[in-house]
Structure formats: C-alpha cells, structure tokens
Image: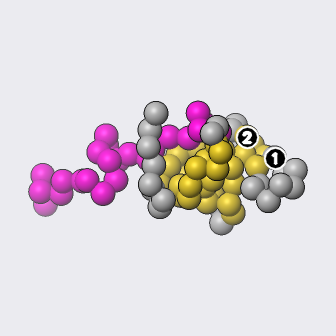
Amino acid sequence: MQTYNPGDLCYIPQDVSHYSPSGLMSARKTSRPKTAVFINEYDYASFKVLVDGEYRVVNKNHIYPLNLEGVEIGETDRSAVTK
C-alpha cells in the first residue's frame, strides 16, 4: 500500500464517494477527478484529505499519489530540462 505524508498531493478519480469527518451525513461523489492534500489516516480503511477547501474522508482504495511524469513530487530532476 502507498504511504503518504501530511501535505502530500493526491488524486481522487471521478465518481468516488467522500464524506465529512464531522459525523454529519454529508456523503457526496466527485463529479470529476480532483486533486487533494493528504491530511492523515482517518481510520483503518480511510484517509482524511483537504479537497475543494473542505476536509473530507475518502476510502484508501480510491485515492492515488499525484505523480508528475512518473516522478514523485519533490524528487524531480530538473537538470535534464532543455532551454
């Protein structure tokens, strides 16, 4: 399983259910793919993320690390960039 650190960017695909961690029944589905910020592990099956300015809880199986051209964020080698 992928490990995340607080502040890592992640990807949530379209049509994924997410809900408010406040306990209120506010389940929604993503209408399009979303970029989120990983906050922490919420429980054994879910992560807490920040998406669209709101804290939401998403199933661990429905969230993916946000990579750029197959390179982990923060590890990009810019020496190969041509001008």
Residue 41 picture location, percent across and down: 58, 49
Residue 17 circle label: 2
Q: Amino acid at mark 1?
A: Ala
> In this figure, what is the number of numbered marks?
2
The span shown in magenta is 59-83
Residue 83 horizontal side relative to residue 33, left or right = left
Q: Quadrant of residue 22?
A: bottom right
Residue 29 picture location, percent across and down: 75, 43
Q: Is residue 65 magenta?
A: yes
What's the coloring here?
secondary structure
Residue 27 circle label: 1
Residue 31 appears in view? no
Q: Residue at x 65, y 45 (%)?
A: 43
Q: Residue at x 13, y 60 (%)?
A: 83
Foreground of the two, 21 or 51: 21
Q: Earlier in the sequence, mark 2 or mark 1?
A: 2
